[in-house]
C-alpha cells in the first residue's frame, strides 16, 4: 500500500468603548445538536453584514469557535450552516465576552424517499451520480485564478488532548482548477505560532523514521516524500482540487480512478440551506484494496448540477478481523460568487510514538572511593532481580570485572550499588574503556528494561477558509512561502491589510469547552 506522506455580537452595548479597545478580545460559541446535545463538528460560521460575508470559521471537534470582538461593529449577524441541519441566524449582540454562547441546531428536513425512488426510475445510479460530479468539476469550480485567506493548524491528539498545536494565517493564490496545485499555487504566511497554552511533547513532534523500532512510525505503511512543507502536503490530500494528480490511496487520481476503484450506494437526500444533496456511501473494491486494507466514506453531491460539497474518506488496515484507521480526510466546498471554493480540509493519520516512559538506566557512575558502580534507574526495579549480581556485567578493556554484591542505596529505591571484589581502583583515564550490560530487570510496573513503551497518537493537519479575497489571483509584488521549508522556517509577510481580516480559531481549552 502507498501512503502519500508528502510528507466575535454582544450585550456589551453600554461599555463598547472598553471592548473595542481590546483588539485581541474574542467572542466564543459552541454548536451542539438540539436533541443529543453532542458537539457539531465542522459547522460553518459566517459573519455577515447585510448580504456580504465578512469572514468565517468552522467549528472545532468540541463544537467550539471564536471570532474577534471587533466584528461587533463590522457584522450584524452570524449565520450557521451544516450539512443535515437547518440554517440558524443570530444577531451579533447575542454574544458577550464573558460567556460561551451555546447554539443548538435542529436536524434539517430530509427529502422524502419518493425523490430517491424517482432517481432510480430514470436510471440515475449512484455510480452515475458520482461520474457526473467528476465530469462537472470544471463547470462547478473556479477555472480562473482566485485567492482566499484562512486559518491553518496542525497538532496531535493524545487521549483527546491537543498536543503540539501550531497555528498560522495564510493567503492562498490559486491559478485555477485546471492547473497543478502543488506546482502553481503560491502561499503567503501572515502569522505563525507554536501555541504554548497546550501541552508540547518533543518526542511526538520529531519526524517519522518509518522504523518498527524507531521513536515515531506508521506500522505497515510506506511513506514517500514528495517534497513540500506541512501546509503544502495537507493540500495534496484534497482530492477535489487535485482531481488530476495522485492524492492518496485508493482515490489515486480522482478523475480517472475514483469511480472504478469504489462501489457507491445512494443512501438518501439531505439538505444544506435548502439545497438538496445526494448522500452516497463509498466503499473500496476488494481487487483494488486487497485483503489487508479497505476504505470507506461518504460523498455529498448537489442535485441538478452535480457539484461536490463534501467528501469524507477513511482508509483502514485490517488486523485480525478488525479495522485500524490509517488515515481520514474530510473536505468540504461551499458556493461563493457562483463557484465552489474550499471551505475546510482536515487530514488525520495515526502514528506510533515513543512515550519516553519506558524502564531504563539513567546513568552509571563509578565511585573509586568504594570501588563500585552506582546505577541509577528512572523507575524503581523489582527485587530480587535487582540485587542479583548475575544480571550485571561490567567490562574493562573487554574483560569482565568480578562483582562482590549488589544492594539498594539506602533512601532511594531507584539507585543500586554494584560492589566489585577487592582490587586496585580503576584509574580515571580508563573510564572510557568501561562498558556496562544490565539485563533481565523489570520495574515495579512490570516494564522490561530498555523496552520502548509506545502509544498511538493521531496527527491532524487542518485548514479553514475565512474569506475569498480577490478574483484575479496572486499579487505581482509579494514574497511567497517556500514549500521546501517548514512554516516555522518561512518568512512572515508583514503589513498586509488582508491579514487583519483573519484570525486564529484556536480550540477552546478543555475547561472552557465544558463551560456553559
Image (cartoon, rainbow, N blue to C red):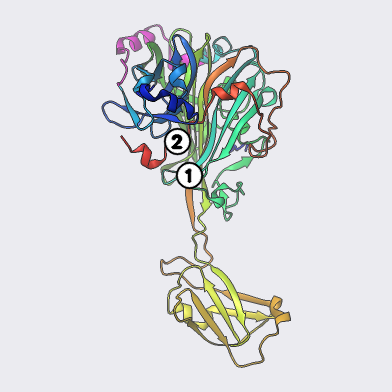
Report helix, strand or loop for mark 2. loop
Residue 94: x %, y % from top left:
34, 22
Q: Quadrant of residue 170?
A: top right
Q: Is residue 48 above or below residue 393?
A: above
**Labels 1 and 2 touching (C-beta < 8 A):** yes
Q: In terms of depth relative to the viewer, which is nearer, 202 or 390?
A: 202
Q: Which mark is residue 198?
A: 1
Q: Is 397 left, or right, of 448 in this rendering?
A: right
The magenta span reads: 106-131
What residue is rendered at 30% in x and 15% in y? 109
Q: Is residue 125 magenta?
A: yes
Residue found at x 46% / y 14%: 129
Vertical relation: 368 (above or below) 269: below
Residue name at image x 63 percent, y 16 percent? 176
Quadrant location of the C terminus in the rendered image? top left
Per the image, the residue denoted by label 2 is 507
Amino acid at each position: 500500500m502507498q501512503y502519500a506522506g508528502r510528507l466575535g455580537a454582544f450585550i456589551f452595548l453600554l461599555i463598547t468603548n472598553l471592548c473595542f479597545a481590546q483588539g485581541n478580545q474574542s467572542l466564543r460559541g459552541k454548536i451542539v445538536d438540539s436533541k443529543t446535545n453532542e458537539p457539531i463538528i465542522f459547522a460553518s460560521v459566517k459573519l455577515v453584514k447585510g448580504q456580504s460575508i465578512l469572514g468565517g470559521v468552522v467549528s472545532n471537534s468540541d463544537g467550539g469557535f471564536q471570532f474577534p470582538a471587533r466584528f461587533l461593529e463590522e457584522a450584524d449577524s452570524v449565520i450557521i450552516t451544516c450539512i443535515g441541519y437547518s440554517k440558524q441566524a443570530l444577531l451579533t449582540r447575542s454574544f458577550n465576552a464573558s460567556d460561551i454562547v451555546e447554539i443548538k441546531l435542529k436536524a434539517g428536513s430530509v427529502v422524502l424517499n419518493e425523490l430517491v425512488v424517482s432517481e432510480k426510475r430514470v436510471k440515475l445510479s449512484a455510480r452515475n451520480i458520482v461520474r457526473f460530479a467528476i465530469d462537472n468539476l470544471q463547470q462547478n469550480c473556479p477555472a480562473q485564478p482566485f485567492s482566499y485567506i484562512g486559518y491553518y493548524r496542525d497538532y496531535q491528539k493524545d487521549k483527546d488532548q491537543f498536543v503540539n498545536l501550531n497555528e498560522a494565517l495564510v493567503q492562498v493564490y490559486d491559478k485555477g482548477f485546471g492547473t497543478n496545485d502543488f506546482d502553481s499555487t503560491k502561499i503567503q504566511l501572515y502569522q505563525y505560532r507554536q501555541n504554548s497554552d497546550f501541552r508540547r511533547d518533543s518526542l511526538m513532534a520529531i519526524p517519522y523514521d518509518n522504523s518498527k523500532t524507531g521513536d515515531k512510525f506508521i506500522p505497515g505503511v510506506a511513506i514517500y516524500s514528495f517534497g513540500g512543507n506541512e501546509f503544502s502536503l495537507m493540500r495534496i490530500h484534497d482530492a477535489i482540487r487535485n482531481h488530476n494528480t495522485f492524492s492518496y490511496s485508493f482515490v489515486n487520481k480522482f478523475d480517472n480512478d475514483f469511480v472504478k476503484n469504489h462501489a457507491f450506494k445512494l443512501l438518501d437526500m439531505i439538505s444544506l440551506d435548502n439545497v438538496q444533496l445526494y448522500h452516497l456511501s463509498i466503499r473500496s473494491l476488494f481487487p483494488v484494496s486487497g485483503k489487508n486494507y479497505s476504505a470507506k466514506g461518504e460523498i455529498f453531491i448537489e442535485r441538478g448540477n452535480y457539484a461536490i460539497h463534501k467528501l469524507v474518506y477513511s482508509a483502514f488496515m485490517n488486523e485480525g478481523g478488525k479495522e485500524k484507521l490509517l488515515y481520514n480526510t474530510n473536505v468540504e466546498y461551499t458556493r461563493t460568487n457562483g463557484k465552489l471554493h474550499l471551505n475546510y480540509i482536515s487530514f488525520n493519520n495515526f502514528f506510533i510514538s515513543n512515550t519516553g516512559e519506558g524502564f531504563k538506566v539513567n546513568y552509571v557512575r563509578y565511585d573509586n572511593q568504594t570501588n563500585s558502580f552506582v546505577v541509577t534507574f528512572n523507575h524503581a526495579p523489582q527485587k530480587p532481580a535487582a540485587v542479583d549480581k548475575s544480571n550485571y556485567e561490567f567490562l574493562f578493556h573487554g574483560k569482565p570485572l568480578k562483582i562482590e554484591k549488589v544492594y539498594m542505596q539506602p533512601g532511594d529505591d531507584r539507585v543500586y550499588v554494584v560492589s566489585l571484589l577487592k582490587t586496585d581502583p580503576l584509574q580515571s583515564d580508563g573510564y572510557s574503556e568501561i562498558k556496562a550490560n544490565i539485563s533481565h530487570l523489570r520495574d515495579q510496573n512490570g516494564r522490561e528494561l530498555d523496552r520502548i513503551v509506545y502509544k498511538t497518537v493521531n496527527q491532524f493537519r487542518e485548514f479553514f477558509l475565512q474569506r475569498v479575497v480577490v478574483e484575479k489571483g496572486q499579487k505581482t509584488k509579494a514574497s511567497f512561502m517556500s514549500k521546501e521549508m517548514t512554516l516555522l522556517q518561512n518568512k512572515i509577510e508583514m503589513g498586509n491589510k488582508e491579514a487583519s481580516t483573519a484570525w486564529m480559531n484556536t480550540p477552546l481549552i478543555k475547561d472552557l469547552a465544558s463551560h456553559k
